[in-house]
Each structure stands twice: as C-alpha cells, then as structure tokens.
Image: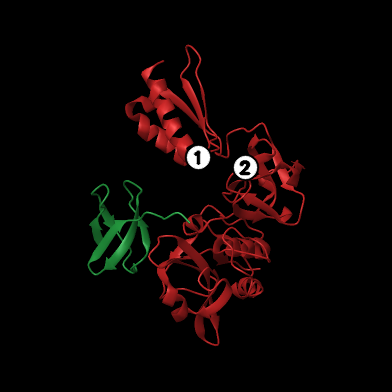
Amino acid sequence: MNTDCPECGTDVTAPKDVEAGEILACDNCGVELDVVSTSPLQVMVFEEDEK
Amino acid sequence: MSNLRQEVDQVFDTWRAQTPHLIASVTEESNTPLSITVLTHKQSKQLQDALGDHASEIRITVLSHPETETPLGFVSPVAPITALHTSPTLDKLTTEIHPQDGSLRVLANHEEAILVQGLDGTLAWASSAAFQPSKDTWSSLGVLENDGRVRSALSPQELLREARSYLNTPYILGGRSRKRIDCSGFTSLVFRDVFDTVLPRHSTDQRRCGKRTTQAKCRPGDLIFARLGAKNIPHVGFLAEQAGDTTVIHASQRVGFVIEEPIEDFFGGYRFMGMRRILKRVAP
C-alpha cells in the first residue's frame, strides 16, 4: 500500500497488514505519520501532545 | 557583535522564555568557530533550523549525547526510591529511580540540585543530597540488542506474572515504584526486574523498540500502544491472556491504577496505536 508523505511528498509504502492508528515513519524525511485509514491508505503527520 | 552571534542570542532568548533553567552556553573566541553547547538533540536541531545557512559556521555540542564528556561524573541514588523532577525547584515529579537502575550521569548543577541523565533516556533534576558518587558507569547495565529486542530463555508468562504483581498500584504520572506508577514506568520496571534490561523510560521511545507486530499476530507479552481520548499521548501496556481471552495489563490513567482488563474494554477508552514485540525467546 502506498501514499504520499504529506510533509515531503515522497512515496510512502506501508506494510500490507498496516492497521488504522499505527504510526509509520517516512523513509525520506523521517516524519512520523498517523495512519488515518487503510483502504484507501491515508496518513497525516503525527504530532505528539505534551503530557 | 556579529550577525551570527545576534541570531544565536535570539534563539537563546526564545528558549529562556520557555525554559527557566536552560542548560546551554556559547563560547566565542577569536579565530575559532562559534562553539555552542546545548542539552538535547532537539535543541541542536532547533538551533540549526533557526540559523539556516549559518548553521555550518558553528560547532554544536550536545551535552546529553552519550559520548560527550561530562566532568561531573556518575552518581547513584542513596535511598531505595528517589524522585526526579522536571526542574531544579524539584516541585514536579518526572520519574523515580532505584539503586537497581544503575548509575546516572551528572550533566549540570544548580544550587542544591543536579541534572542527571539515565541510560533509559531520563533527563531530570534531583536533590544532590539524594546521591553519592559512583564508580560504575552505564556499561554495567543490560541493554536492548541492536534490533531493539531482548533475547531470553524466560517465557512471556514469567513477564506477565511480574506484571500482575503490580495490579492495583495507584497511577501517578511520573511514578515508577510499587507505591505509584505510570504506564511506561510500569513496563520499564517489569522488563528491568525480569530481564535485567533497560527499556526506555518513556512510551514514545518504547514504541520504537523491538519488532512491529499486529493485532492479528500478537502474542502475550507484546507491548500494546494506544492513546487516550483525542490526545496524541502514547500509552503502553502488556498484552496478556486470561481464560482464553485477550487482556491488557496496564497502569491506567483512566481508572487510576494498574489493571488487567479485556482488550475490548481497553479499547473502550484507548485508541490503537501499534504493537511491538521486545522479547525474543532463545533456548535455555
């Protein structure tokens, strides 16, 4: 499954069994991506909140 | 004053506004590059971003980098449980440590407080009176292997037996003892006591350890990560099994203590974020 990194635009490949909610990393820019949906694969930049 | 120095001072002023006890310094001597010491890699990145093209003109030393020499040496806690705090005023708990956690590196001091660093990523302030000098360094501690896993002949059941011994311990953010505990303090203590291995202190770092697994392939003993409500704050617990049903053992902020609950109930409050397998079993 592929989609574009919202940060750098590079192609991001997710594992076939990726699950909604998982956090991926963009191999190009290193930003963490939140898997919003898997079919189709949609991601958004993950920003951790302060405790 | 040079433009570069002015830009550096501007970054420092911004940090000072956010961080009352900033650990950073600038050394400027003629015929040498501007030399700046900052505490964390995050600060180094912020500084480089703020300076843009000028970043190549400065030499940045990250004090918390394990290979940066620190003249203040190592210390070990005197008491069975020592509280560490977010600032030298020692008013907000960030974690608790024990002699079994090994030595801490001292990065700075401020009046009666010292800034200490643990191998588990801890960076916190404590009363200097709570520590004694130590000859041990981090090399004496067990760490995860290069793949972020721990190899052991022990079974996940032994891990879960230890985890269940914490049931009903009150949840306090920053707690890491049998009196009070938070989610990642709980998982790090269990790993330390079962495998004699240092797991990162924070769930953010724990979720980068080990091997990715999925809800379909998970096994008892795997770490499960989730977030509470709408906030993106990683929460962690152990996946377990009871009477054939999948359960989660975790220090729950939602219920206020360490609990074992069916995974369906867990997902009633927390949203899935991933699963990691740290333990790799090997033959005895």
Percent position (x, y) of residue B8? 42, 26
Specify whether B69 is left or right of A5: right
Question: What residue appears at the point 62 percent right and 47 percent down from the top-left corner?
Answer: B118
As measured in the structure, the alpha-carbon distance from the residue carrying label 1 to the one carrying label 2 is 11 Å
Residue B114 appears in which quarter of the rendering?
A: top right
Percent position (x, y) of residue B243? 55, 87
Percent position (x, y) of residue B110? 64, 35
Quarter occupied by the C terminus of chain B: bottom right
| Chain the render paints red | B
* Residue bearing mark 1: B19
* Residue bearing mark 2: B88
SS for dot 2 = loop
Question: What residue appears at the point 33 percent right and 60 percent down from the top-left corner?
Answer: A34
**Chain A rendering hue:** green
Return the disc, 1 or 2, that comes first in the chain's sequence. 1
Q: Is residue A1 visible?
A: no
Percent position (x, y) of residue B207? 47, 59
Quarter occupied by the N terminus of chain B: top left
Residue B177 appears in which quarter of the rendering?
A: bottom right
Q: Residues within 10 Å of mark 2 (few under 14, many from 20)?
A: many
Specify whether A31 is left or right of B242: left
Q: Look at the picture and state if B11 lies above or below B266.
A: above
Q: Is residue B14 visible?
A: yes
Residue at the limit of the structure toward the bottom, as seen here: B243
Going by the numbered disc 1, the residue's amino acid type is Thr
Colouring: by chain
Tag shown at residue B65: none
Q: Look at the picture and state if B181 lies above or below B26.
A: below
